[in-house]
């Protein structure tokens, strides 16, 4: 199974992005999942006038989020996920914004997801427990 980082989802909503076509192809791959964090991050970006060129209304954004929820298995945070996160924090000295990447990795480990697709591989390469793929390089 594979997990998509939020940037893949965001590009898939932005037909003006140079990554749009590839992202659309990626999200049609079988055996993929996302986390509740991906949903929140994607909503935040696609409804933000400051950082997103094709801004969605909150209602339209949530309709798109619902499509993602139907398409992918959504990994939710369990007590065991928090335990894995604590282990990662201690092992990799995670702090500040690094918590968000560590949280995705914790979900991956807790749900036995081996691979993350991301346009920010440097954020995940330190986590030896997972495979990191940048589909755009």
Image (tube, grey):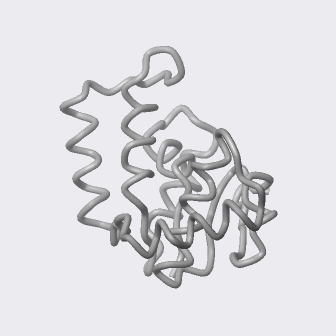
Horizontal and vertical percent position of residue 18? 64, 39
Q: Residue at x 75, y 67 (%)?
A: 91
**Residue in the foreground of this view, choosing between 63 and 93:** 93
Horizontal and vertical percent position of residue 84? 56, 72
Q: Residue at x 46, y 70 (%)?
A: 81
**Residue in the foreground of this view, choosing between 99 and 45:** 99
Q: How many marks?
A: 0
Horizontal and vertical percent position of residue 132? 72, 68
Horizontal and vertical percent position of residue 127? 75, 68
Q: Residue at x 47, y 50 (%)?
A: 9
Q: Residue at x 71, y 53 (%)?
A: 94
- Residue 116 in the image: above or below residue 44: below
- Residue 43 in the image: above or below residue 32: above
Q: Quadrant of residue 54?
A: top left
Image-based side of 1 in relation to 39, left or right: right
Image-based side of 35 in relation to 83, left or right: left
Q: Quadrant of residue 125?
A: bottom right
Image-based side of 42 in relation to 133, left or right: left
Quarter holding the C terminus is bottom right
- Residue 41 in the image: above or below residue 1: above
Give the farthest residue toward the top: 50
- Residue 50 in the image: above or below residue 93: above
């Amino acid at each position: 199974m594979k997990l998509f980082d939020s940037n893949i989802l965001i590009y898939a909503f932005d037909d003006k992005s140079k990554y749009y076509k590839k992202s659309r192809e990626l999200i049609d791959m079988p055996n993929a999942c996302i986390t509740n964090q991906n949903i929140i991050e994607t909503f935040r970006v696609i409804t933000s006038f400051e950082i997103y060129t094709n801004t969605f209304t909150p209602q339209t954004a949530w309709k798109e989020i619902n499509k993602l929820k139907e398409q992918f298995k959504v990994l939710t945070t369990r007590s065991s996920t928090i335990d894995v996160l604590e282990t990662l924090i201690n092992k990799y000295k995670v702090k500040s914004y690094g918590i968000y990447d560590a949280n995705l990795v914790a979900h991956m480990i807790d749900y036995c997801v081996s691979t993350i697709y991301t346009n920010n591989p440097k954020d995940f390469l330190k986590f030896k427990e997972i495979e990191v793929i940048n589909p755009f390089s």
